[in-house]
Image: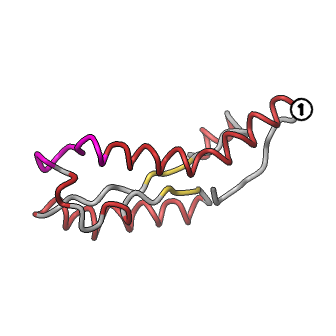
Amino acid sequence: MQELTAQHPAARIVLLQPVPFPSGSTAHAVATLALPATLAVAAELGLATIDLFTPFCDQGDAFPDADHLNSEATEVFTDVVLRELQPVLTSRLESIGSGSSGGGGQSRL
């Protein structure tokens, strides 16, 4: 990660929190391993995260085949990501327009 940020100092790296699976061993692994690991890495490296876990809790019908989001859930996923990224993207576009390099270490979206 340090190499990536050194090569691209103006880049904003954002980790997506995992979407919870409705049931079974994968659901347990996401909730007890993947989510805490994602949050720990983000905290350790000062990276922003986008919470995709909370919007899908108790949404078992979002996974019609237990692996893939249905069309409505895909829209929710997209809306959450775009809503969270919009301020960063807007700021970056403004800094490009003003000739600023846009550096700095921002840890929240």
Q: Is 11 or 20 nearer to us in this picture?
A: 20
- Most extreme residue toward the front, as rendered? 72
Please check the rendered image and state whether residue 68 is part of the magenta-colored stretch, yes or no. yes
Magenta-span inclusion, residue 4: no
Which x, y percent locates residue 2? Answer: 61, 46
**Residue drawn at (63%, 56%) of the image:** 109
Estimate the x, y position of residue 48 in percent, counting from the top left. Answer: 58, 56
Report the residue at 53% width, 60% height from top.
42
Q: Secondary structure at mark 1?
A: helix
User: Residue 21 is drawn in which quadrant?
Assistant: bottom left
* Side (left or right) of 2 relative to 20: right
The relative height of residue 64 versus residue 30 in the rendered view (above or below) is: above
Identify the amino acid type marked 1: Ser
Which residues are drawn in magenta? 64-73
Q: Nearer the viewer, residue 70 or 45?
A: 70
* On screen, residue 97 above or below 44: above
**Classed neighbour count for the residue bearing mark 1: other residues with Cα under 10 Å, few (<14), some (14–19), many (≥20):** few
Q: At 29% across and 46% down in the image, what residue appears? A: 72
Residue identifier under label 1? 98
Applied colour scheme: secondary structure
Q: Nearer the viewer, residue 38 or 81?
A: 81
- Relative image position of residue 19 (x, y in whole percent): 32, 56
Left or right: residue 101 compared with residue 49? right
What secondary structure prevails in the magenta region? Answer: loop
